[in-house]
């Protein structure tokens, strides 16, 4: 997760972290990515049931619940276990989490147990009464998926009118004083919509947006056709940075993030240097070092509707264990799990251009799931890294010294 507003626009400086001791339990949500203890943020797919059939659904959602979904008692026990373990945030996802018959109970228990609860939804079920209830039981944030303007969104979601319903959900959350943001997966279909999405963000006064880089895990041929080229990815990040900067100049300061391509951090740093903003680039570099790059199996984890644990929400081919057999804490700390132990020290195991990259320390070797899907080797270079060989050859020690003198 790369904070464009934090890094490129200077919304956060390294000194801002000192008062919190970089502990997950003390950091506000917008600074959690810089925690030192790296207790994992958990994406919990509480159900496989969904009322849409999205092209890019990593969970392969179905119209009804999947066989073997956790019972109410198992789900409540898991919520307590995760909070006791110290997971700072539980992201309730699906399928469509609002389909889960006990979603309000799970959110409330999570909050009362000391963790923060957030929810990712397509918005179709978010009524006024439900938005008020989620606010009252302590949900911190609801992210509504919006995959471009009407044509692109409805096509990706498989439902005519889905775009208007998503906008209605955003309005419903705002009127209920429930913090709401947008979640957009960048594809060829919506690449041309990014500028207008920023217009919408400003018009609606939405305080947060996450741009997700598409993760193609080979499920559907049409998904591969939606993947961006390296040049298109660079252009998308350029536009996101530009529009974020322009909004801040106008006095509107939304939190803007990109997700699932750690190369965005080094790219923004290089962009700031090229623009002559060396002091700000130095601050961004320090924040990137504190962030540590991709966190699968370390600062991020995932649990499915049937209790299986994964390194992240996209990597469904590598099962770490089942909460029906062992508590999450035992699974997450298992010294006998070779993949998991390597993920916690992945910089020592990546190969190819990732291994020799000058940004390895702050990128963490990219998204391991993407490398695994593309090559069958979880330690191969991330094929979505769009930095050139010249760019990854940078001497960061020298660059840091120059920035410090500015």
Image (spheres, rainbow, N blue to C red):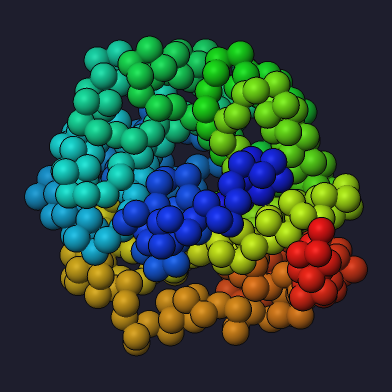
In front: 207, or 188? 207
- Indicate the position of residue 381 as horizontal and vertical percent values: 70, 71
Horizontal and vertical percent for residue 177?
Answer: 35, 19
**Residue 176, relative to residue 11: is it above or below?**
above
Determine the residue positioned at 24% across, 64% down.
85
* Image location (x, y in percent) of residue 23: 38, 61
- Residue farthest toward the left in the current orientation of the protein: 73
User: Which percent across, then down, holds residue 309?
Assistant: 33, 63
Number of labels in the image equals: 0
Residue 356 relative to residue 365: left or right: right
Q: Quadrant of residue 127?
A: top left
Residue appearing at x 38%, y 82% in the figure: 337
Write the residue at 27% across / 61% down: 86
The quadrant the C terminus occupies is bottom right
Instruction: Tell which residue pokes out farthest to the front in this image.
Output: 405
Left or right of 326 on screen, residue 141: right
Q: Nearer the viewer, residue 214 or 403?
A: 403
- Image point (79%, 71%), residue name: 401
Q: Is residue 360 above or below residue 126?
A: below
- Asked if residue 320 can be seen in this view, the reply is yes
- Residue 131 falls in which quadrant of the image? top left
């Amino acid at each position: 997760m790369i904070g464009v507003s934090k890094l490129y626009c200077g919304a956060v400086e390294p000194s801002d972290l000192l008062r919190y001791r970089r502990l997950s339990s003390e950091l506000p949500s917008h600074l959690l990515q810089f925690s030192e203890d790296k207790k994992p943020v958990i994406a919990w797919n509480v159900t496989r049931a969904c009322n849409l059939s999205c092209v890019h659904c990593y969970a392969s959602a179905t119209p009804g619940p999947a066989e073997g979904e956790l019972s109410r008692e198992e789900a409540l026990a898991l919520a307590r276990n995760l909070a006791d373990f110290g997971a700072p945030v539980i992201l309730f996802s699906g399928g469509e989490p609002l389909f889960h018959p006990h979603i309000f109970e799970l959110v409330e228990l999570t909050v009362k147990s000391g963790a923060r609860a957030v929810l990712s939804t397509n918005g179709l079920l978010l009524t006024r009464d439900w938005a008020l209830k989620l606010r009252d039981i302590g949900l911190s944030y609801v992210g509504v998926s919006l995959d471009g303007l009407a044509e692109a969104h409805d096509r990706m979601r498989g439902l005519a009118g889905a775009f208007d319903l998503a906008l209605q959900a955003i309005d419903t959350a705002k009127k209920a004083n429930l913090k709401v943001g947008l979640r957009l997966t960048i594809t060829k279909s919506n690449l041309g919509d990014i500028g207008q999405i920023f217009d919408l963000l400003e018009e609606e006064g939405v305080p947060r947006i996450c741009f997700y880089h598409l993760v193609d895990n080979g499920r559907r041929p049409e998904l591969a056709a939606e993947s961006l080229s390296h040049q298109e990815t660079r252009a998308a990040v350029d536009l996101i940075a530009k529009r974020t900067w322009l909004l801040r100049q106008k006095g509107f300061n939304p939190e803007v993030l990109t997700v699932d391509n750690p190369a965005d951090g080094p790219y923004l740093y290089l962009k700031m240097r090229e623009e002559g903003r060396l002091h700000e680039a130095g601050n961004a570099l320090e924040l990137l070092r504190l962030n540590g790059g991709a966190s699968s199996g370390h600062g991020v984890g995932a649990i499915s509707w049937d209790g299986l644990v994964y390194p992240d929400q996209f990597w469904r081919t590598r099962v770490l264990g089942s909460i029906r057999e062992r508590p999450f804490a035992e699974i997450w700390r298992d010294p006998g799990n070779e993949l998991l132990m390597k993920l916690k020290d992945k910089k020592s195991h990546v190969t190819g251009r990732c291994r020799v990259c000058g940004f390895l320390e702050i990128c963490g070797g990219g998204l391991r799931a993407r490398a695994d899907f593309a090559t069958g080797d979880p330690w191969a270079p991330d094929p979505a890294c769009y930095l050139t060989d010249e760019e990854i050859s940078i001497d960061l020690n020298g660059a840091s010294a120059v920035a410090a003198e500015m």
